[in-house]
Image (cartoon, rainbow, N blue to C red):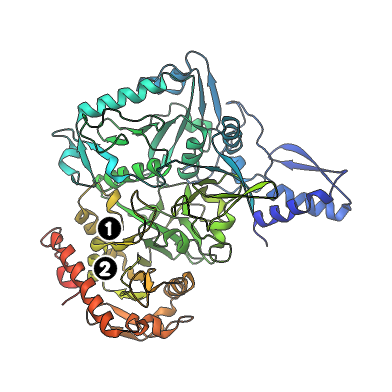
Amino acid sequence: TKPSHQKDKNQNQGKHQRKNHIIMLASSGRILLRTATGVGGRTALRALAARAATTPFPSPKVSSETVRTNFNYRYKSTVAVETTLPRDEYNVSSTITGADACTQVGIDDLGITNPTTIYRNLTFQELFDHENKNGEGKVANAEYGDTFAVDTGKFTGRSPKDKWIVKNIGSESDQNMWWGDINQPTTPEVYKELYDKAVAHFNTLDKCYVFDGYCGANPKSQKKVRFVHEMAWSQHFVSNMFIRPESHDQLEGFEPDFTVINACSQVDEEWERHNLNSDVAVVFNVEEKKAVIFGTYYGGENKKGIFSLMNYWLPMQDPPQFPMHCSANVGKDGDSALFFGLSGTGKTTLSADPHRALIGDDEHGWDEDGIFNFEGGCYAKTINLSEKTEPDIYRAIHKDALLENVMLVEKDGKLVPDYFDVSKTENGRVSYPIFHIDGYHKPQMAGHPNNIIFLSCDAFGVLPPVAKLSSEQAMYHFLSGYTAKVAGTERGITEPVPNFSPCFGAAFLTLHPTRYADLLKDKLEKHNSTAWLVNSGWSGGSYPHGDRMSIKTTRSCIDAILDGSVNEATWTKDDLFGFEVPDALPGIDPLVLHPRNTWENQDEFDATAKKLAGMYIKNFEKYADQGSVDYTQFGPQL
């Protein structure tokens, strides 16, 4: 069976050949009329079935009294219903007007009282209509359907030096926060000024957009989140990325656990007096359960901010839960796998596997029941994207997806995405709801993982494509988090730079890294999971002399791990790093598996390998005698 978007594509190609034949479609209790041409009786019936399942009809306007569906799984991102499209299932939209609009929605508690029109949880079709009407971007004619595209200005990635946490002296967060360059402290007084400034700005507006949703598919730890935005596309982004409410009942009396007021069009002119780093400010107050955003339109600030908070909340629970910067998928037999890695290492690409069901592409939790997604969508890089190399992501770009900072070229009077043009940024992105991936794992939860994969983008070309780790080595590499910052993911990064990022996500850690390492240690020991190190970086030499590992090679390594064929390999222990490297794997040149063989000058490889090992050792000094175990002895030995 072809994917639904492939059917849409084929039907669209033939739409000019059909007319004057009436087909009546029944979908979710309503009759839809479409026209076709030269379609006989049997063909009409086949067309009826195909269109009922795949055609993206516009959602009708509904009121809060619309009949509500009682879903079996209230807390997952989406639920497949045979008679409706997934996009139509998300229909809890309301437009509140009048002098008491803010009171009706509950944002008057924030101090926002002026807007008289509030667009709350608009449907995907309504968001598309608003984006066009407001002129917030352009419509891109992507191969599988028109997709709205926005330009976020000079900020095409996160601005980590502009993220701040309020230091409330003596509070729980004050005592537990990992203070430093990642979690920079600011004062309650600065926060109060910025919060009042954000509220004052929204009180100059006649309308605003409010999204109420969830973070975390497991009801035991799920958080209610609220976003207040100026623009429709910003609500579109969080509608894609967070777990969407499934009924109006969920929004009645909605009391958020955390609220983000995004005043992205405003800047902090007083940033020097506030002892900040620029006029951009992303400030979180854990105790007040609020955050404000100034000066950056980049959508990722919304989702990564909440992820940082989940990294704080979950380990503080009883019993503690393990938050993870990773993607996850599950096989037909229920075998789940985790993919740890920073942006650009392949988390999204490698977890979108045609032979497995995607759980999520970026943020997950691991508790006593197993693993679960934090999000309701995916946020994928588009650099050099093609249907051949990344079919699931490529085909997910159609109506309801949202392109960010992707260059558009005019062809036959239409604007077409050019994923190979990175003149704007190498961090072009697309967000889309999870149901855009065919065969996604609908419960958004799975059992304890069989395999844990650490993805590294090794700019030195020293690490093998795949290596097996002992449980102690796994802890060492988890705390090391070696990779390379990839161009465009952060402001000021234009080429790969070697980087150690603890837990493969230092930028989002709110507690000390050893807190998360201890949680992983407990999980590995209890559930007997196997850990692997996979290098998606360079081979045959250091950057820029070597070549980037092909997606095909990395995919073959992942396939061998997940289908178990890697266990049939013979192994060679690496004398320097101590991990085991397979001598042969299906579909991979054996020379590539041992990177020394790919270098023209093997003496130069040896010197470079010792240099990288020294960097590991130097970096890990900070973790000596930290946490429950000192894992120094399980790293490279010079």
Decide: is 118 above or below 4.
above
In the rendered image, the quadrant that contains the N terminus is bottom right
Question: Considering the image in quadrants, where does the C terminus appear?
Answer: bottom left
State which quadrant residue 632 falls in: bottom left
Q: Residue 165 location in percent, x, y?
A: 24, 38
257 vs 266, nearest the viewer: 266
Q: Is residue 64 above or below residue 491?
A: above
**Which secondary structure, mark 2?**
helix
Instruction: Give the mark count.
Output: 2
Callout 1 environment at 10 Å: few (<14), some (14 to 19), or many (20+)?
A: many
Left or right of 32? Residue 464 is: left
Q: Nearer the viewer, residue 95 or 48?
A: 95
Task: Tell me, yes or no, if residue 439 can be seen here.
Answer: no
The location of residue 250, given as percent across then percent down, is 48, 33
Q: Position of residue 390 (x, y in %)?
A: 53, 63
Q: CA–CA distance between discs 2 and 1? A: 11 Å
For the residue carrying disc 2, how many other residues have a C-alpha within 10 Å: few (<14), some (14-19), or many (20+)?
many
Q: Which residue is mark 1?
A: 503
Sequence order check: which comes first, mark 2 or mark 1? 2
Camera-nearest residue between 504 and 132: 132
Residue ID at (17%, 35%): 171
Q: Secondary structure at mark 1?
A: helix
Question: The residue under label 1 is which amino acid type?
Answer: Cys
Where does the image place residue 339, in percent across and percent down from the top left?
39, 62
Q: Residue furthest left?
A: 625
Task: Tell me which residue sits at (31%, 22%) in the image.
Answer: 196
Q: Which residue is mark 2?
A: 474
Callout 2, which amino acid?
Answer: Ala
Q: Is residue 542 above or below residue 294?
A: below
Can residue 566 be seen in this snapshot?
yes
Against 18, residue 617 (above or below) is below
